[in-house]
Image (cartoon, grey):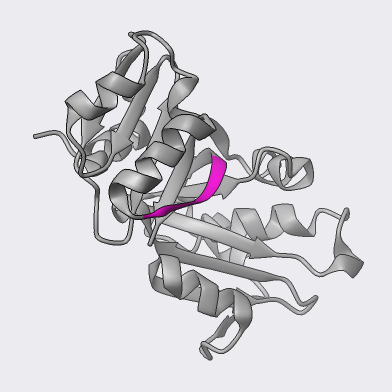
Amino acid sequence: MTTLADILRGIEAGVFPAPDLSVTVVPAPSERYTCVVALTAHIVIAADVDPAWVAERIPAGDLSAPLNPPFLHALEQQTGRRVNAIDAMLLAPALTDDAKRAAAVEGLTELTARDHPRVERAWRYRDEVRAYVDPLGGLVLTGVGLAGRHEVALEIPDNVRGKGHGRRLALAARALIPPDSHLWAQVTPGNAASFRTFLAAGYLPVGSEALLVR
């Protein structure tokens, strides 16, 4: 049986589900997450629901319906969860060159305490969280999230915004994961500044997702 992890690992390798206007239903990847993933002309619903239940609520060929409020609300009711966010998904490979990896993380210090609000939040949604701070007060986190993917989050102090600092941290995150892996960023589409930051650091948009959490 195909799983969400299979689909995401395929995307990391450049292999996407067929753009055939269809909806694929796969099991929820874990107790932590249920989700709807929208790709080019293909929807993936990772939830412990009957595919027939999904088909009854999504008109054939309507790929906007799965991320619209009526269906998401029905999915909330069916799974006992709530929509946490609807984000764009961006993807970048890890940096593999040793010199580039070393340069990217220069000046970062690992934050071992877990009482930072952003770190506490990261542990609610991810495993294997690692957090790093830099001399200007920026924070970059990596962790293992949805279906085993490596994920990144950033926090940039107001006084250094607009100076390329976020781009540097987004690039550094690519050096903080294993060289043979990929890194996913979830960005609210309306957050244009964050979107530009990740694009400038080599991340590419691959789709969008709605996460439902308990």
Q: Is residue 71 left or right of residue 23?
A: right
- For the record, the magenta segment spans 81-87
Q: Position of residue 58 (x, y in %)?
A: 36, 19
Q: Position of residue 174 (x, y in %)?
A: 52, 54
Q: Is residue 181 left or right of residue 122?
A: left
Q: Is residue 160 left or right of residue 41?
A: right
Q: Is residue 207 visible?
A: no
Q: Position of residue 81 (x, y in %)?
A: 38, 55
Please say if 169 is above or below 58: below
Q: Residue at x 28, y 40 (%)?
A: 46
- Magenta region's main secondary structure? strand
Q: Is the N terminus in the top left, top right, bottom left or bottom right quadrant?
A: top left
Q: Is the C terminus in the top left, top right, bottom left or bottom right quadrant?
A: bottom left
Question: Which picture quadrant has residue 189?
Answer: top right
Please say if 111 is above or below 42: below
Query: In the rendered structure, does residue 183 fall within the stretch colored magenta?
Result: no
